[in-house]
Amino acid sequence: MIFSQTVEYALRSVVWLASHTDSPQTVQQIAAATQVPSNYLAKVMNSLRRTGLVESRRGLGGGYILARAADLTVLDVVNTVDPIGRIVTCPLGLRSHGLNLCPLHKRLDEAIGLIEKSFVKTKIIDLVVQNDGAESICGDAPCAGPGGKS
Amino acid sequence: MIFSQTVEYALRSVVWLASHTDSPQTVQQIAAATQVPSNYLAKVMNSLRRTGLVESRRGLGGGYILARAADLTVLDVVNTVDPIGRIVTCPLGLRSHGLNLCPLHKRLDEAIGLIEKSFVKTKIIDLVVQNDGAESICGDAPCAGPGGKS
DNA sequence: CTAGAAAAGGATATTAACATCCACATGTCG
DNA sequence: CGACATGTGGATGTTAATATCCTTTTCTAG
């Protein structure tokens, strides 16, 4: 898999937060909605907090809310939990040749660059499903298709 | 890291094979040139053989040679050792909604698609460094830069 | 101040990726 | 045939990602 499980979890959760800005969302709520193990999600959310992507409040009525909601991108989230590492030096040790990567790594880095470019363009806010969204980040209706019945 | 270590190893080795078509290359030779643990490389080469990307010969004078050298692409290699998994159904189980991914996974899949597209366009043969290439897949001179001195 | 809700943080378990080692099969050379 | 070089395959070890559990801290309500 190209993207780690943790990236997947973090993105689901952030999208969920982006679509539930009325009140702080607890780890339990987010975990249930995004189908992520709650214990593990607690760790992920915590690291998102440390890098300032989300804010937390403890105690009753507490939970997580999105910080920088307006301009938060997919890349921000990805780079927090599992940074996209551009290839800047040849992984083969021989001589660090700076900008002169061999063709293979030049090509691989270009591919990574494509991902980076795609992710920096995508705002979290634009990934929010526009409906009641009670059940999942996908929402119910659109996920089941226009007909809504299987 | 976006690409697994195994992918990196496999690509280095295949590029090396593409640039050394005169005689079969042993695992030891490839391992030394590409700086990959030889024991592990043996496994990787074996799986490349099973999928037909390379051919092997045992015994003295044996080793690996590239099969399908002319049209082999980066994607072929990647998909052999660590397949690029397109997202075809929502990872959240609720209803398999086929082509109707939620915006998040639609976007992620598009990104994966970019990689796939980039990789299918890149032939291994085009990644070969055009010089003596005695030391590494990068070769010595180009890696150290035009000046050759650090 | 107490009770309870929730995040924070540490310790530990599980799993998969990565790596090593060894016995065996299969080839070449003389 | 014997000697040796090589890939093949199985067993096992190591490490990092993923996941679970428990205790502590911080908050709100009353």
Image (tube, coloured by chain):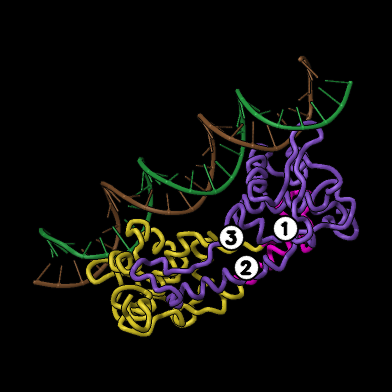
Chain colours: A purple, B yellow, C brown, D green
Amino acid found under the numbered disc labelled 2: Ile
Residue at x 58% of width, y 54% of height: A82
Q: Nearer the viewer, residue D27 or B19?
A: D27
Q: Is A37 on the left or on the right of B63, as rendered?
A: right
* Residue position for label 3: A2
**Marking on residue B89:** 1
Instruction: Magenta stretch: give its range.
Output: B87-115
Q: In the rendering, at what x and y percent does residue A9 appear? A: 67, 49
Q: Is B123 on the left or on the right of B141, as rendered?
A: right
Residue A123 against residue A150 in the figure, above or below: below
Of badges 1 and 3, nearer the viewer stands 3
The answer to if B88 sits in the magenta stretch is: yes
Q: Split into 4 quadrants, where in the image is the C terminus of chain B?
A: bottom left
Disc 2 and disc 3 on one polypeptide chain: yes
Disc 2 and disc 1 on one polypeptide chain: no
Residue at x 41% of width, y 61% of height: B44
Q: CA distance from mark 2 to mark 3?
A: 11 Å
**Marking on residue A115:** 2
The picture quadrant where one finds residue A111 is bottom right
| Cβ atoms at labels 1 and 3 below 8 Å apart | no
Q: Can the viewer see residue B57 in this picture?
A: no
